[in-house]
């Protein structure tokens, strides 16, 4: 189970394993369009590359952080 929690970051829960990551700091948030989609694609990229859950969460967070700093869902 992976949950995004806005300003509280994101969390992965797999049986008894709980992994959390925070948010990127000092972002110029312009538009939240596409943030969830980009988070999911970044997380799944890490997952499919057999990266750790923490690394996958961080990739998702990085992707979402980029898209929210511009208008529209383009990277």
Image (spheres, grey):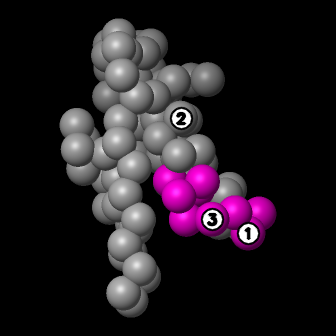
Q: Tell me the SS state at disc 1.
A: loop
Q: Tell me the SS state at disc 3.
A: loop
50 to the left or right of 2:
right
**In terms of sequence position, does the residue under pointer 3 or pointer 2 come before the other?**
3
**In terms of sequence position, does the residue under pointer 1 or pointer 2 come before the other?**
1
Whether tag 1 and tag 2 are in contact, CB under 8 A, the answer is no
Residue toward you, 39 or 56: 56
Q: How crowded is mark 1: few (under 14 residues within 10 Å), some or many (20 or more)?
A: few
Whether tag 3 and tag 1 are in contact, CB under 8 A, the answer is no
Q: Mark 1 points at which residue?
A: 50
Which residue is located at x 67 percent, y 58 percent? 46
Residue toward you, 65 or 21: 21
Q: Tell me the SS state at disc 2.
A: helix
Real-space Cα separation, disc 3 to disc 1, in angstroms: 7 Å
Which residue is located at x 58 percent, y 45 percent? 59
Real-space Cα separation, disc 1 to disc 2, in angstroms: 18 Å
Which residue is located at x 35 percent, y 14 percent? 26
Which residue is located at x 35 percent, y 36 percent? 23
Image x and y of residue 72, in percent: 44, 20
55 inside magenta stretch: yes
């Amino acid at each position: 189970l992976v949950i995004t929690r806005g300003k509280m970051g994101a969390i992965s829960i797999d049986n008894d394993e709980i992994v959390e990551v925070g948010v990127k700091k000092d972002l110029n948030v312009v538009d939240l369009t596409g943030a969830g989609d980009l988070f999911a694609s970044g997380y799944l990229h890490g997952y499919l590359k057999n990266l750790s859950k923490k690394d996958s969460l961080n990739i998702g967070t990085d992707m979402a952080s980029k898209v929210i700093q511009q208008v529209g869902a383009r990277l």
